[in-house]
Image (cartoon, rainbow, N blue to C red):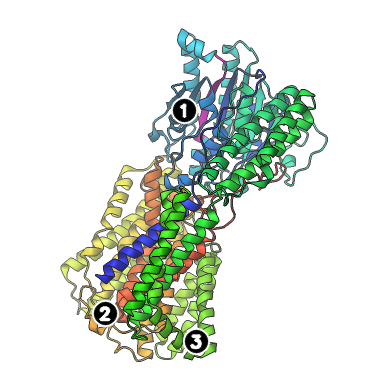
Amino acid sequence: MNMLIFIIAGLLVHCVFLASIFDIYFTSPLVHGMTPQRTPLPPPAKRLVLFVADGLRADTLYELDDNGTPQAPYLRNIIEYKGSWGVSHTHVPTESRPGHVALIAGFYEDVSAVAKGWKENPVEFDSVFNESKYTWSWGSPDILPMFAKGASGDHVYTYCYTAEKEDFGAQDATKLDTWVFDHVKNFFQAARSNQTLFSKINEEKVVLFLHLLGIDTNGHAHRPNSREYKDNIRKVDEGINDIVSMLEDFYGNDGKTAFILTSDHGMTDWGSHGAGHPSETLTPLIAWGAGVNYPQKVTSQFFEDDFLKEWKLEKWKRLDVNQADIAPLMASLIGVPFPLNSVGILPLDYLNNSAHFKAESIFTNAVQILEQFKIKMTQKKETTLSFLFTPFQLLSDTEQINILRKARSYIHQEKYHEAVSLCKTLISLALEGLSYYHTYDRLFLGISVVMGFVGWTSYVILLIVKTHTGLTRSTHDKASTVLLLYGFAAIGVLIAFFLLIQTCPWTYYIYCLLPVPVWYAVVKEFRVIQDLASLVLVFPLGQSIGFLLAGALGIEILVFSFFYRSTLTFGLIAFAGWPLITRLWTQAKVTTLSWTLLCLLLAMFPLMPVVGREPNISLVTVAGLVILLISSLSLACLCKIKNKYVPKKDLTILLFQMLSIALSTYVVNSTHSSLHHKQGLPVINQIISWTTLASSLFVPLLSPTFFFQRLLSILLSLMSPYLLLSTGYEALFPLVLSGLMFSWIYMEKEVLQHYGDSLKPKLAVLNFSYTTDITQFRQLHLDDIRRSFFFVFFIVTAFFGTGNIASVNSFDPTSIYCFLTVFNPFVMGSLLVWKIVIPFVLVSCAFEAVQVTTQLSSKSLFLIVLVISDIMALHFFFLVKDYGSWLDIGTSRKMPNYSIRNNATKWH
């Protein structure tokens, strides 16, 4: 019963700790209740056409080919003769949903979306589409419905192709863009004979949105430097030319149409996106038409990059912006209110209008952002006692009024330059204040959660010492326990009362009250603490310090491995020398040699390039042949051990697994050959892949439970789907890792024999199905901490040995082509997770074998692993950050600052 209570308490503490990360770091920054703000002067355009070329890189669009010809001749002509251009600096994560939200709604990724999946924002938001009179959009079903869903009323219309058309293995992905262009043309052709539709599209404040996904699809399938990617750019260029000509003809060249071309994100050379590489964050921005500045020729302009010379555009002024700035630009051009949640700053250099119009527009922009600041401040003030509330000093109520009055006065006096400068200052302060109030409770909540988690970890350590070491024999003093209970209960009541009078959210009660019972449980074991302190005091000081330093170094190595993969290499090299330090090599030379060689071999993987950048199917074939060779040798060994007779059932299972390995190797080669020749994914290959995946989940359960046979069966079954999900050298990783796990098991047996703790029975006769006699379990030694550390280290190696596979940016769609080529985030994500889990399963099975062979209870080792993991978790809690790619989120403490703007003259 005590164990059950411990498990429930542990689950509760860890669930609260996990939930607190979302509550502290990943709450939505969006607020509601603001008043729409619109520029009071008439807008220059009646309608806006937004072209978003999904996955289009700035350098690929602007560069010239080997013959000096532009990739997009029509758009190049716009840059040189008709409009303004620059680079839009996107923010990470460079994904389609957050990119489009930044473009159309004016704010960057809402980090609370991490709990909502890929397709939608967790909080409703305003957008340029919502503020428009009518919006018509054509394109992907993954993007368009998001903005129609959030719109008030029924004025945002979407026309989407089916999800099945988003096929990475398709013969020609440009058909996605052709579909959009054709449907836009058909729409306007139909409008000529439909009076209701004709009158709607001739209204003011109309937006036409063309989402062009073909470039992104071709980039994933063939890489951005491929002929297919560049041909798709030319197709888009031709399509835009046709659409512009058609619209000018339809509207009678009234000069009231503004056009903007941009992209939601770029793409790496290896065909992925999601992180912050310049090829992902630098996207093109070209604007022309009503209200947009004409090209501005300059004699010189300075940027820290050399792209202007490469692009042959050094004579035309480059106007860089942040991606969120495009939303207020669009709103200003057609005269709709700025999106309520926008944090973008209107790029005035793109506007071809009077100084008065620019001053009024930036003033409206400042008031719109200030409204968000005021709502955020009011919300925080209402949930904080007046004497405890600390306002944002740089933007007090008086300061707000003074700046607004002064700016308005400058506009009346026609001092437009001064008004613009003052409004930009106000915007900067308001954004800084938004960040201040968004993180207002972060320190308070962080301290509460840390106190609870430190208390829990302390309690687990005391539990290990008390029940698994035999170092203490203390009993509880009932009188002291009752006194402690009343004392901690009183503390809990005071904390609850303090939260109640501040009308804090219910989650605050959990975070603040949880430390009370946890620390009560710790303090209640004060006798154990006394005994432990006495033992530590009699222990040699040098050894105590050495042990603590070794433990701290080990934890830091584990933490650093999440940031720098090469740290794993240093750790594995140190592991290779472990038998030499402990002199195990003198009693088991073959085992020691295999351990050392496998450690050094595995240490090579973290030094290799991240998986997916350079596919090499031949290495997958090699891995398949090696595992077939290993399974054949294993079969020969089994026949030898069992006097040339293997039970028919065992033989059938082993042969089936070998057949699965062979089929998987064939399917990988066949699929990639078929896709290379643009013949699509063969149906038979898809059937074999899904069948292999399904069988790998239950076939190991049918194998014999003897130590060697069961572990071999697990390896063979899991290698089949892993091969199908591999594209290069990572296919060899589970083989080396499994070899090291087998060696580890034998090494641990040698360690026990070396210290006289075991009689060293043959591992081949061990059976996982036997019920272990608990009386045979031994007490914990210091060496068991080392075993647990090895397990945690191998788990981390399993996750990060072949790349930062927790990152979306490391995910190569090529790895799932044996299963499907049609875009499906849920299925693709599930397959990626299974690929990540397979090495984890191999390490976990080996750890179970270590536990059996070393005569330890699984509970005792589990508790040590729990302590190591909890210390790491606490470390990471202070390193979490709430912006960046999904790889970055969770790896650094740096806080978002709305006021810190990317310098538009620098690459990031």
Between marks 3 and 1, how big is the CA–CA gap?
A: 68 Å
The mark that comes first in sequence, 2 or 3, is: 3
Task: Determine which residue is flagged by label 3.
Answer: 581
Determine the secondary structure under disc 1: loop
Vertical relation: 534 (above or below) 561? below
At a point 44% along the width and 23% down the height, the residue shown is 153
| Of the image marks 2 and 1, the number of the one nearer the N terminus | 1
Q: What residue is shown with label 1? A: 151
Mark toward the viewer: 3 or 1: 1
- Viewer-proximal residue among 647 and 551: 551
Please indicate whether residue 439 sits to the left or right of residue 530 in the image.
Answer: right
- Range of residues picked out in magenta: 203-214
- Which amino acid is tagged 3? Ile
Question: In x, y percent, where is residue 224?
Answer: 56, 43
Q: Amino acid at mark 2?
A: Ala
Task: Using a 10 Å C-alpha cutoff, classify the residue at mark 1 as few (fewer than 14 neighbours), some (14 to 19) or many (20 or more).
Answer: many
Residue 819 at x, y = what percent?
A: 35, 47
Tell me what residue is drawn at x 50 percent, y 82 percent. 547
User: Residue 91 is drawn in which quadrant?
Assistant: top right
Residue at numbered disc 2: 764
Tag of residue 387: none
Residue occupying image coordinates x 51% and y 87%? 543
- Asked whether residue 784 is in view, the answer is no
Q: Between 656 and 713, which is closer to the camera in this rendering?
A: 713
Q: Are marks 2 and 3 in contact (CB under 8 Å)?
A: no
Give percent across and percent down for residue 339.
56, 31
> In the image, residue 176 lies at what x, y percent?
47, 31
Tell which tag, 2 or 3, sits nearer the viewer.
Answer: 3
Work out how far the residue at label 2 is from the one at label 1, CA to CA, in angstroms. 66 Å
Label whose residue precedes the other's in the sequence (3 or 1): 1
